[in-house]
Amino acid sequence: MKRKIGAVAAATAALVVLAGCSTTPEAPADDAQGQDITLWLMGGDTPDALRDYLKTEYADATGGTLTIEEQDWGDALAKLTTALPDADNTPDVTEIGNTWSPTFTNVGAFSDISDMYEDLGGDKLLPSFVEVGEVDGANYALPYYFGSRYVFYRKDLYAAAGVDVPTTLPQLTEVASKLHDSALSGFYLGGEDWRNGISWIFAYGGDLATKDGDTWSSTLSDPKSIEGLTALQELYTEASNAPVTESDSTPWVNINTQPDADAPEAATIIAPGWAHWSIGDLAPDPEDDTKTIPTWNDDVFGTYVLPGVDGGVAPVFAGGSNIAISAASKNQAGARELMTIIFSPEYQQMLGENGLGPANEDYVSSLGDDQFANALIESALSSKLTPAAPGWAAVEGSGLLEEFFGKVNGGGDITALAAEYDEKIDALING
Amino acid sequence: MSATSNGARIAPRRTGVPYLLIVPAILALLLGLGYPLVWQFITAFQEYGLAQQFGKAPDWVGFANFGALVSDGEFWAVLVRSLLFCVVTAFATVLVGVLLALLMNAIGRAARLTLQISLLLAWATPVAAATTIFIWLFDRRRGVVNYLLDLLPGVDMNRYDWLGHPLTFFFVASILIVWMSVPFVAFAVYAGLTQVSEEVLEAAQLDGAGGWQRYRLIIGPMIRPVLSIVLLLQLIWDLRVFAQITLLKDAGSKSGDFDLLGTYIYKLGASANDFGMASAVSIVVLIITLAISWVYVRDLLAQDKETR
């Protein structure tokens, strides 16, 4: 018992100390010198070279240490929700999915950085991303990078089947169905993969939600949305072997010919631009025999942008992220210093060279002019963001979109489902 | 505090010491569980969303959150699904655990040691590792389960997506949880079995009791207290199961059809930012847990009275 009392006493003492820490407000330093700060990056999209650059530059500028913590996209919403309001645990600067920016900006999670806006790039910054990080004309979250989605296909399989690259969306379904059999997906697309699926809604002129006054409402039941969903359901049913429950998938696995297989499992996929690093002829990795290294082969693989209904380019989901300073951060000065480094010409240039669309349009040329850069830019130009509604992050977090697209692609009654999920989304979308 | 009672009768002294001794335990409970519980209870009666998380004052809404739950079809579906899952999994765990304990009791030393080590290894496997292994076993493309089933003549399980259908999803989840919790049950029941005296069993055998009769009439009643606490713990654990379902959902579907109470609460609160509703559901789970436990506590109290 003695030992137990001792342990409890120790625990109580620790709690008192901890409580002491959290209640002692540290005066916000206005000097970045020596401030150690934390940056949250989402997923592995930012390559190591860029991370190292940020750390070195930050140390040079302030003498402090920059710690980069990578957050998994899947848990990010929950982590941001719990960490951002808490001064002791908040990251000082965080990357945030562009579609979540309105939600967090509206509740006051981020610091007002309007005074830095001009210095960080001003009008040159990607307008649609700036807009989702704005409240009443003040800037809170700014663009970090943009990405876009386009189509990768197997030239060898298209040639063998005698089909050409489609130029309209209905043609795409036709081509994909022709290529399709039980071992090969004409167009590999997960049933719950709404981030790709919404392109069909957009292409037919529909939208996810519209704003009337101050109120957002879900528009899945709009006749144009229904038309798009019908086309998507047809494509999925006729040309995809992917499970109906697959959402965030890695379709490049399916378009590559795997080492122990004779043929690939997909003739066509749609994926974010950076996926091209993962597509190609696979050769064993000399350093690690459990891995393979893909080498892009122009004879086998090709790209095209998702075609519109009557030709042209279909609007795809504008991928990418914003970046912002946590309002609860005790290291505002250090965080602002890091923002300056991120929006510097050198870093913007590095983003582009690594296939991430730079926030500042002056550096878009750094993406290069190969087929990947061209497809990225062409698809990004007509890309669309999800609704800038205050409750959009909750809509995404609730998994309703995965559920809805899964049920549509599973062969459900689109009109009935659209009405059902409009109602469910409406309950969340206004925050 | 009269220290002198030099009589023959030794009455329990009424001092404050026992109460003092339980203070640390109560304090630890209050600090560890009290705060979140109180917060959860308060939040269940508020409209508490992301704005409140970032400092806006919450509105009191009385029983509105509970009212919304009662009229929400999804909540009822999740609740019924969770209760079914919990009961099936807990009983399966106890059944397999008891059988293994009986086996341990019956076999030789070397075989028993092998079995015990295997069980300990299963018990020691971290949740994330065990779940990952099960995801691989049941993988649609490369899983050994589909491969083996496919070898059977007339069975076509090539590419069968176990995690893609609610029924098979919960089947896999149930096997995983049974696999992970059986060692605990087996060891606890085995410990109980070693307390059953040889003499009694021998006497029963001489009186002509067969194996099944010996189990039903002697061993069963003697290990009943162990069985009931083990079953209770399994029911509670399986009702609030979270990690395995989350990890399996990550590998399968994001759809609500695959949610149990644990993941449903997490989704409502942490992902959809409706902390008020999430707290309300948590309170419901708490009440169910207390109701299950009450059956056991009542039992304990009754036994206590008998022995007095």
Image (cartoon, rainbow, N blue to C red):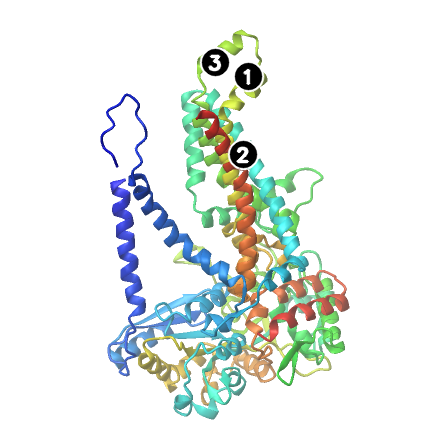
The image shows residue B203, relative to residue A93, as above or below, that is: above
Report how far apart the C-alphas of labels 1 and 2 lie in the structure. 20 Å
Q: Can residue A174 be seen from the camera position used here?
A: no
Q: Classify 10 Å Cα crowding around label 3: few (below 14), some (14-19), many (20 and above).
A: few
**Quadrant of the image for the C terminus of chain A?**
bottom right
Pick the residue in front: A208 or A58.
A208
Which residue lies at the image location 52% right of the left edge and 7% below the top edge?
B206
Q: In what quadrant of the picture does the N terminus of chain A appear?
A: top left
| Amino acid at pointer 3 | Val
Against A255, residue A361 (above or below) is below
Q: Position of residue A171 (x, y in %)?
A: 73, 74
Determine the image quadrant of residue A115: bottom left
Q: How far apart are labels 3 and 1 at the CA level?
A: 10 Å
Q: Regarding mark 3 in the picture, which secondary structure is present there?
A: helix
Residue A216 in percent (x, y) is at: 64, 79
Foreground label between 2 and 3: 3
Name the quadrant containing residue A333. bottom left
Q: Residue furthest top?
A: B206
- The residue that mark 2 highlights is B94
- Report the Cα–Cα distance between label 2 and label 3: 25 Å
For disc 3, the marked residue is B200
Q: Which sits in the foreground, A17 or B240?
A: A17
Q: Is residue A3 something that shows in the picture?
A: yes
Tag 1, which chain?
B
Q: Which numbered disc, 1 or 2, marks the residue that appears first in the sequence? A: 2
The picture quadrant where one finds residue B45 is bottom right
Question: Mark 2 near mark 3, Cβ–Cβ under 8 Å?
Answer: no
Q: At x 73% / y 69%, what residue is drawn? A: A419
The dot on residue B214 is 1
Q: Nearer the viewer, residue B165 or B295?
A: B295
Q: Name the residue nearer the viewer: B63 or B167.
A: B63
- Quick one: SS at disc 2? helix
